[in-house]
């Protein structure tokens, strides 16, 4: 039976999924069975039924005046809390893990990709195991066999599949949050965890539907919060760009000196 406790498990692959999402669970089970990879379901926290305890640590003033401009939806809090609890598990068990969502289609080399990601993530901290969104800035930092590792400016576009080390997870859990979880992970200027991507990827395709434990309700942002939000958006872009350029320069210098 799926369990959310912190007792050590033999598997290193966890799939976040609502217990009631039977069709999605069947789909992802079929994918991992075909790939010959063991995994464990991690019961997603449904923020629509009750606010996660993590919600009390939400930075509402920053959210309202600097980032979104509107309160977080319950489903967004549930999504964040689900990933957060697995980061805690990663730190508690002191071992790298892979975290996936339940609408993914796996690479036929999934077993090899997973083994390589778990071996490499202690070096990189965070490894995105899906494609980089079009337009996303990245830089090749290493080629090892037929695997390529890229430094990303931002982790924009989701957390459908990624590997994370205990060291990186311990940094993420120390900070109050005011972003959706994928945007928070990408905000390396806050927590110091840079985003890297490994290819071939674990995920070759994903469902187009919205994550089931998020919420489709749309809210409008009030006009008078726009100036402060625009300033923070510019600040965020500058911080991401400067850190990316600094890291790229350091990597190139290291390569030239070898």
Image (cartoon, rainbow, N blue to C red):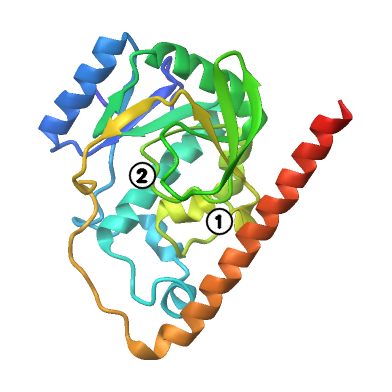
Judged from the image, the secondary structure of the residue bearing numbered disc 1 is loop
Crowding at label 1, few (<14), some or many (≥20) Cα neighbours within 10 Å?
many
Judged from the image, the secondary structure of the residue bearing numbered disc 2 is helix
Crowding at label 2, few (<14), some or many (≥20) Cα neighbours within 10 Å?
many
Q: Position of residue 17 (x, y in %)?
A: 25, 36
Q: Which mark is residue 242?
A: none
Q: Are marks 2 and 1 in contact (CB under 8 Å)?
A: no
Query: Is residue 29 shown above or below 178?
Result: above
Q: Which mark is residue 82?
A: 2
Q: Quadrant of the C terminus?
A: top right
Q: Position of residue 193 (x, y in %)?
A: 62, 46
Identify the residue at horizontal 63%, vertical 33% (top origin).
124
Identify the residue at horizontal 46%, vertical 63% (top origin).
57
Q: Nearer the viewer, mark 2 or mark 1?
A: 1
Q: Is residue 35 left or right of residue 66?
A: left
Q: Position of residue 163 (x, y in %)?
A: 49, 30
Q: Going by the picture, which residue comes out furthest to the top? A: 36
The answer to whether residue 69 is visible is yes
User: According to the image, label 1 marks what residue?
Assistant: 187
Q: CA distance from mark 2 to mark 1?
A: 19 Å
Chain-order first, disc 2 or disc 1? 2
Q: Going by the picture, which residue comes out furthest to the right? A: 257
Q: Nearer the viewer, residue 53 or 112?
A: 112
């Amino acid at each position: 039976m799926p369990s959310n406790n912190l007792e050590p498990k033999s598997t290193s692959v966890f799939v976040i999924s609502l217990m009631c999402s039977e069709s999605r669970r069947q789909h992802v089970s079929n994918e991992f069975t075909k790939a010959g990879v063991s995994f464990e379901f991690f019961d997603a926290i449904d923020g629509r039924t009750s606010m996660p305890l993590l919600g009390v640590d939400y930075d509402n003033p920053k959210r309202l005046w600097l980032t979104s401009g509107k309160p977080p939806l319950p489903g967004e809090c549930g999504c964040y809390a689900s990933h957060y609890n697995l980061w805690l598990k990663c730190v508690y068990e002191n071992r790298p893990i892979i975290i996936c969502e339940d609408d993914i289609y796996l690479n036929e080399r999934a077993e090899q990709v997973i083994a390589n990601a778990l071996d490499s993530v202690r070096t990189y901290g965070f490894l995105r195991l899906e494609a980089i969104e079009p337009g996303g800035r990245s830089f090749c930092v290493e080629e090892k066999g037929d695997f390529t590792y890229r430094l990303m400016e931002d982790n924009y576009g989701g957390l459908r599949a990624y590997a994370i080390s205990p060291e990186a997870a311990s940094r993420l859990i120390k900070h109050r949050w005011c972003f959706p979880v994928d945007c928070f992970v990408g905000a390396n200027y806050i927590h110091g965890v840079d985003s890297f991507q490994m290819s071939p990827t674990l995920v070759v395709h994903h469902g187009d539907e919205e994550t089931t434990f998020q919420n489709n309700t749309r809210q409008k942002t009030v006009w008078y919060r726009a100036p402060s939000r625009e300033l923070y958006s510019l600040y965020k872009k500058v911080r991401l760009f400067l850190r990316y350029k600094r890291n790229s320069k350091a990597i190139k210098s290291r390569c030239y000196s070898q």
